[in-house]
Image (cartoon, coloured by chain):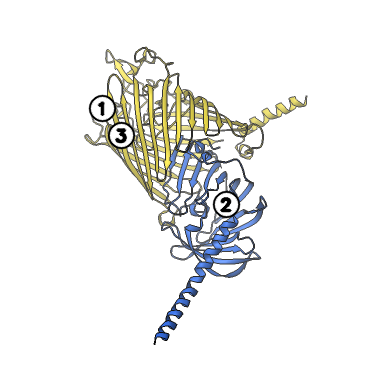
Amino acid sequence: MKNLIRVSIGLAFSAAIFAFAPAQTGLEIAVKAEKADNGWVSSSNRLVMTLTNRNGQITIRQMHGYSLEVENEGDKSMTIFDTPRDVKGTASMTFTHKTGDDDQWLFLPAIDRVKRISSSNKSGPFMGSEFAFEDLSSQEVEKYTYKYISDESVNGQDCYKLERYPVSKTSGYKRNIVWYNKDNFRPEKVEFYDRKDALLKTLTYSKYNQYASEYWRANTMKMVNHQNGKETSLAFSDYQFGIDLVDSDFSQNALKRAK
Amino acid sequence: MKLFKWEVMLVMASFLTFSLSSFAQETKKKEPKIYKEVSGNFKVDYRYFPEDGLYDGQHNEYFSMVFQPEIYLEWNKGKDILQFTGFGRIDQYDTKRTHADVRELYWQHIYKKWEVSVGVKKIFWGVTESNHVVDIINQSDALEGFDLEQKLGQPMVHASWSPKWGTLDFYAMTYFRQMKFPGPQGRLRPPFSVDQSRTTFEGNRDEYSPDLAVRWSNSMGIFDIGLSHFYGSSRAPLLETKDGVNFNTHYELINQSGLDLQASTGSMLWKGELIYRVSDRKSINAFTVGGEYTFSNIYKSGIDIGLMAEYNYDNRGIELISSMDDDFFFGTRFAFNDRQSTDFVGGVIIDRNNQSTRYVVEANRRIGDSWKFTIESSGFFNIAKSEFLYLLRNDSFIQFSLAKYF
């Protein structure tokens, strides 16, 4: 009888271990992906955002940005709008946090004011695009829980296929499916499922370049919204790493003078 | 000769930059030794007042044009900056509202944790929406609107230091900017005229007497906080008269301490501003407290709706031009987050005792890539005779604006 109990406890344990394994593997892959991208310290880039509506009409937005890696915390970043002309000089600053809401400020040059942005707005669109704020903010491991699904090939690359679930209740998604390249752990594709678990958007990364012989950056990110037929593509250029940026370059003063 | 050609080309290039908006966008590269940007906007306003003016010479319809050029130069790897922002308005009837101002013209040098600027600047302090009691550095451009939201440029030396524990700003100002009032043919004016040449200052002060200010500000987690002190000539004029017909302005010497505080908790922003001001004549305390709640991405539409509520207190009472002595503010903000950046903001300010009500609504939409259309309306209901605004009670208006950005 004792033996029987032992066996069943043992079985229960192995079942539990078996059930947890995908979550552990999923987390491990996500951690490896983050580690692979650690140590870039600071970077800047330029960005052209192309919005395409259902009828193929195109609208173009230009901006540039700076980011600073913060150890053991989320990154700090600044985005400055160049076009359209009426929002030129408008700049947003974000302090990402591993847990809890990010801090975000917006500088509006027309009224010379820095305004704090309500930080729970994650699911809203960025500048009328198909990218939500949460798609563009720094992807910290702690923002999701993970489950490993399978190995799968995407864009001809061998990938790990993971499912991840946003921790934040204000996220617009129930889950994402992410494909990480097996070689270098860079993301190749993400599928976003809305709160009703219907496929909402697909993000595809392409034109990867390696910078500072270490960090992979996709020069194109294309987001297709399956529910409204619209598309947004981001074309990054002029990536620079190890630039002269310090903590005080991410202050309200710096936000005001950002050009 | 080559050099000459190069110069001609530079002049032509800057002309092109100035005239072709599309070209201006392409030149944004930080590599050249001097990086230059020319931008700005040109705007046409049509303002209609449904009610006839209370005073002689006033009209019901006004056309006006606004030009706001901006030049930005950056050199020394961004450590040196020159910023110019000009402003000019030509009004169909109001010769006083036809005015020009240098909003900004300063050189700024950045050295490690220090920023030093010399020249004409615009500085804003504060967090609340309906009133800005803490904000004091710049004089209001009262010709642009009786809400006093637009500011005149203020000459100063400004040093800003950012140690670990926040930012310390020091301001030394001279050349006081007087508040200007609309002319006889303008609307939103009192019945009397103000003789700008008879302005008086307290004691033996004048326009050139120095004003000094200091502010500490910091962001700590969910909090944004600012503590400030100002010493100098009050920006808010006192209206003086001997005969009840001819008025002049008087500017007191004041000490004003201010606190502005904001807390961001999820969808809610809590805001508060408080001042204590002393002059020989009077001690003033005033505050604004309230908050803004944002419903974001409503039904996945991308639309954000903000609801705002604030309470204003000021012990100056009916002496205040703004009349916000004991007033509630309720407002809403719609951001459609579409590609035309359509937005709408509206609010009412209601006096707690006599229910005098003032409203403002504004809607904006971009047309194409570089045009913007704005509809704005502002007006008064039920204004009590005791309020300063009673003098403006017939001046509700609607305005249509079209602006071209370059």
Q: Which residue is mark 1?
A: B318
- For the residues labelled 3 and 1, the Cα–Cα distance comes to 16 Å
Q: Which label number is shown at residue B287?
A: 3
Q: Is residue B386 left or right of residue A163?
A: left
Q: In this orientation, does residue A83 appear?
A: no
User: Chain for mark 2?
Assistant: A
Image position, residue B160 (x, y; %): 48, 31
Chain A colour in the picture: blue
| B354 sits left or right of B185 in the view | left
Question: Could you tell me the amino acid type at mark 1?
Answer: Ile
Residue sitting at x 45%, y 76%: A13
- Residue type at mark 2 is Gln
Q: Is residue B353 left or right of residue B108?
A: left
Q: Which mark is residue A57?
A: 2
Q: Chain of mark 1?
A: B
Q: Quadrant of residue B98?
A: top left
Could you tell me how far apart the alpha carbons at marks 3 and 2 are, in whole angstroms?
A: 49 Å
Estimate the x, y position of residue A114 in percent, counting from the top left.
45, 38
Residue type at the position of mark 3 = Phe
Of badges 3 and 2, the one in the foreground is 3
Upstream in sequence: badge 3 or badge 1: 3
